[in-house]
Structures are given as structure tokens and as C-alpha cells.
Amino acid sequence: MKMIRHIISVIIMIAPMQVIAQYNCGTLKDSSAIRACRLYDAADSLAQGSPKCEHYLDSAIAICPNFAPAWHERSVPYLKRGDFVTWRRYLDKAVALDSSYLAYRC
Amino acid sequence: MTRILLILLLFAPYAQAQRPSAQSQSQPRAHSQSQPPGITHPLNVGDIPFDPGIDDPQFQLNDSTRVFQYYNSNSWWLDHKDAYHDLFIKATGKWTAAPTQSGWLTIRFIVNTAGQTGRYRALEMDSVYQPFHFDPRLTANLLATVKTAHWEPAHYHGKVYDTYQYITFHLERGRLVDIMP
């Protein structure tokens, strides 16, 4: 019994770490949002800011312009590489679609 | 003992799963690598291609397909920025009461493996993140100061890499209030 408790504790600790940055596409209902979400998740495994990654995110946005995570992810490499005007433009779009992204604008 | 082994077994796949992602962050990929057809982004975000009109042709990169970002390894700048603070304050000295000179001025450039710098670009925006042009003399002063500073490229696993670096100056009415990153 004690051993089972230990196993459960470890799984609880690890589980959230495994899903960081991955969006749960299964929670979406709209088919275009699901397709955009899958592209977004695929982009997550690519080098951030690389042509391929940007292409995946642009495709996600083209399929579902209301999918906020893709707009947010599109903004990140601009922030990290000093182009704050472009970063803000993409982030503002994410915030307009989902106010939870407001925290990234502070 | 059994518990330790069990915990190690549980963590092993997690560590394996994380490795490629860490590598992709620290080893920028070549922008000439295979791309999907119809790709609209020929370069990595923030890349600075050579411009014969403004760039020094003598400034050469060791490997133009693999240029690190300053955050891909330990950053020489982050360890030494305090030493340059007064130098940059001096560069903005004449503009300390300029009411229109507020915003963020970013200077982005490359440090090659020999420690030389080039391909400087200025990115300017006002206090509300809109494109803006600072007084060209203020920009020139800060640019000249950045050029005189000593820079080191990224070192990673015993190798030296060409590296993108940027410095952002936060100015309020011409007064330098912060230097980032």
C-alpha cells in the first residue's frame, strides 16, 4: 500500500511536466481548431523561430485564425531576439482572442 | 532500494523525451535545411542577411548556417553588462532632457567566432511599442559605444559559434533608465 502511494506521488509529479507546452487538442470541438491545434503541437517539436516552425504556425493560423496559442507562439521568438514591435503585434492578437495571454504582455 | 529503482525507471523516459527539445534550442538549425514546399520564411526569426549597402564585407562568419542566439549558451554579455553601464550612460549624456526621446532602442548584431562584430541593425520603438525613430545622433552614439565594447561569441561543448547578440536601451526623455537583456 505504501509502495502504491509512492508510485502515485511520483506520477503526479511527472505528469504535468510531460504536457508542458502541449495543448490538449481533445478539448476542442471545432474541426478547424483541432487541425490548427495539431499543427501547433507539431511546431512545438521544431526549433523555435526556424522557417519550418514558423510555417507550421502560419498554417495553423490560416486554418483557424481564432486559435490564440498559435498567435502567442508566433510572438515568442521575436521577443527573445529583440524585435519587440513584431512581438507585440502577434501577442496583441493572442490577447484579443484569449485574455489569459495578457499576463505575457506585462 | 526498490523504491529508488522504481523512481529512476519512471524518470528515464521523461529524460529521454526532453533531450531532443533541449538540443533544438541550443543548436540552431541551418536555414538551408529541408523545408516544406511553399514556405514563406526563408530565414530564422531575427536573422540578419548580409547587405552590401551597409555591411562590412570583411566581416565573415565561420558558419552562416549555424549562428547561435545569445541565450543558447552562457552569455558573456549577461556576466559583464554592469561593467558597461557607465559607458552607455555617457553615450546618452547629451540627451538627458529630450522630451521626445522615449522608448526602447535595440541594437542587434553578430559576434563571429573571432570575437569581431558586424551586421549591426537598430530596432526602435516608442513607449507604447510602436515603430519610432530616435534622434539619429543618439542612435549613432549608442551604436558607436556598442562597437567599442568587447564581445565574446557563444561557447558550447568546447566549440565556439558565431552568435547573435542584442542590447536594448530603455530611454525616458533621453535618459537611459535600463539596459536589457
Image: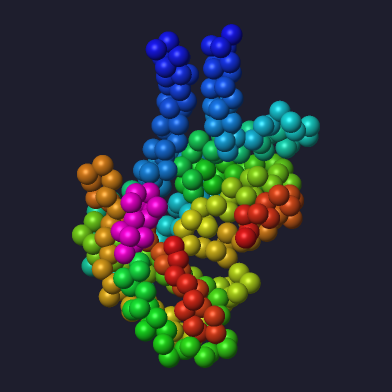
Q: Is residue A78 above or below residue B37?
A: below
Task: Give the colour scheme shown.
Answer: rainbow
Residue B119 visible within the image: no
| Quarter of the view holding residue B77 | bottom left
Provide residue B143's location: percent of width, then percent of height: 37, 77
Provide residue B62's location: percent of width, then percent of height: 24, 54
Provide residue B32's location: percent of width, then percent of height: 39, 45
Where is the N terminus of chain B found, in terms of image quarters?
A: top left
Does the magenta stretch mainly form a helix, a strand or a loop? helix
- Does the magenta run of residues contain A101? no
Residue shown at 44% from the left, 70% from the top: B179
Left or right: residue B135 versus residue A30 is left
What residue occupies the far right of the structure in this picture? A29
Residue B7 visible within the image: yes
- Does the magenta run of residues contain B70? yes
Frontmost residue, A48 versus B170: B170
Frontmost residue, B59 versus A86: A86
Residue shown at 58% from the left, 50% from the top: A74
Q: Is residue B113 above or below residue B39?
A: below
Residue shown at 33% from the left, 51% from the top: B74
Q: Is residue A89 above or below residue B177?
A: above
Where is the C terminus of chain B found, in terms of image quarters?
A: bottom left
Q: How many marks?
A: 0
Left or right: residue A54 versus residue B50 is right
What residue occupies the far front of the structure in this picture? A2
Left or right: residue A41 versus residue B159 is right
| Quarter of the view holding residue B76 | bottom left
Residue shown at 59% from the left, 47% from the top: A73
Q: Which residues are magenta?
A: B68-80
